Image (cartoon, rainbow, N blue to C red):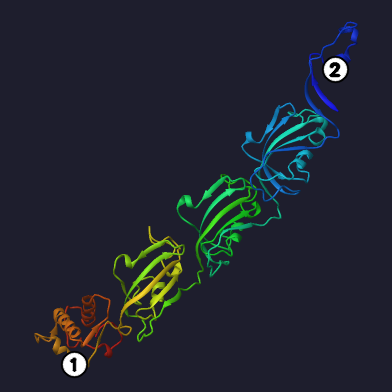
Amino acid sequence: MYIFISGSISLFTLLLFSPGDIIPPDSILHFDVLLLDVWNPEDGVQSNTYHTPSTCSRKVEVSDYVRYHYNGTLLDGTLFDSSHTRLRTYDTYVGIGWLIAGMDQGLLGMCVGEKRIITMPPSLGYGENGDGSDIPGQASLVFDVVLLDLHNPRDGITVTNQFMPESCTRKTVAGDFVRYHYNGSLLDGTFFDSSYSRNRTYDTYVGRGYVIAGMDEGLIGVCVGEKRTVTIPPHLGYGEEGTGSKIPGSAVLVFDIHIIDFHNPSDKTEITVTHKPEECDKPTKKGDFVKYHYNASLMDGTSIDSTYNYAKTYNIVLGANQVVPGMEDGLMDMCVGEKRHLVIPPHLGYGERGVTDEVPGSAVLVFDIELVEMEEGLPEGYMFIWNDEVSPDLFTEMDTDQNKQVEPSEFTDYIMRQVNEGKGRLAPGFDPYRIIDNMFSNQDRDGDGKITEAEFKLKADEAPHDEL
């Protein structure tokens, strides 16, 4: 056994002088000894775990890369080094000679979050010469270690499903655009970021390199509403350098993600008929004036709006760009009394900007609609049509004061009379007086505010535009 001692008379002093010089004959000797260190050449590493985490999915193995904090002391408790004072972990490979032999052995089998005392003899530490400064030669070493992180360079991402929705008609593929929430932490539980704290989702394309490689992979094959934990090794995260602030270099990342919605830029409006009336003589087409009810929500079920809340229908002219394109698609070729379920991708909805305080940017929309009423529109390009034969004295009938010119009031009165008597029809869903004003302007070719007989022509007699 090898020992280090300290006393009032050192052994070195006894060796320099003969006993008779300083110690009288027959003297009784008293030594005040302080034992500083003791070890045996046969000693190996001693490990004593004093805190074990509640879960341990993996333990340190040879060639793993670890991040840990430590306090290093001599056997008598003298502190010689600490990673805590430098405010950064010690990061290294284990079991392949990057560390002193005792630490290489002592770290094996540890779990993330585990705390242990590793004691090693000098033969497995800094040997006969020490480190030349704080560690004397032949000193036993004691390290109080807490393991914060571990991975292997061969590791891929690890995916753990936390919640899977009951129905999943489609899963994400490369090229999809995904909206998701996340909480991001280090492997020891240290929090570094959350989309929830910003009250907005993280929105990105997947499988195209827009996010770190591990997240790019972890977002493939997920369903709307799914929750999963994605664990990402540093070579698929932020690498050896980290982010320079919240994420240290060589850190394993843990993301708890919740998929809110996704779509593909090539998606069209998804239309599902949930109720079809038995009879349907006239399905809707472009130009028809339709009245319908709707319930609108996001893909995660968040309600946006409902016409039922206002006890009145929403009324539009199909093809007049009065609603988002996806709704136009969903209302086409529909019967009165029919009900449909529409899923509208953002490029056919409210796009990247959304609607402030109502619809998030790049959100997929869900509409449940019911067609309540429909009024057939006019042929494309017409804002007014005749139901009967056109009078051969049309201009004369308009010119009520017989002054050879038609004033705006005469023109308006005449058209409205034809509509009220059922002889003509204006395009439904528009302000009738604005239509008539437009018709008058088309006939008033010189723009002098009146129509002469020379200016007056029927639509059938000239190139198409919105007039008689």
Image quadrant for the C terminus?
Answer: bottom left
Residue toward you, 304 or 360: 304
Kind of residue at badge 1? Ser
Corner quadrant of residue 365: bottom left
Kind of residue at badge 2? Phe
Residue pictured at 82% horizontal, 16% vertical: 10
Where does residue 330 sit, x and y in percent of width and height? 41, 75
Q: Label 1's element?
A: loop
Where does residue 323 sit, x and y in percent of width and height? 36, 71
Corner quadrant of residue 315: bottom left
Binning the other alpha carbons within 10 Å of mark 1 as few (below 14), some (14 to 19) or many (20 upward) gives: few
Residue pictured at 22% horizontal, 83% vertical: 443
Where does residue 31 sit, x and y in percent of width and height? 81, 14
Q: For residue 391, which numbered disc appears in the image?
A: 1
Image quadrant for the N terminus?
Answer: top right
Along the horizontal axis of the image, is 455 left or right of 361?
left
Q: Mark 1–mark 2 contact, CB under 8 Å?
A: no
Q: Nearer the viewer, mark 1 or mark 2?
A: 2
Residue toward you, 356 or 55: 55
Binning the other alpha carbons within 10 Å of mark 2 as few (below 14), some (14 to 19) or many (20 upward) gives: few
Q: In this view, does 190 lie above or below 121?
A: below
Q: Mark 2 points at which residue?
A: 12
Q: Label 2's element?
A: helix
Label whose residue precedes the other's in the sequence (1 or 2): 2
Along the horizontal axis of the image, is 431 left or right of 251?
left
Rounded to the nearest angstrom, the CA distance separating label 1 from label 2 is 136 Å
Where does residue 42 sit, x and y in percent of width and height? 86, 35
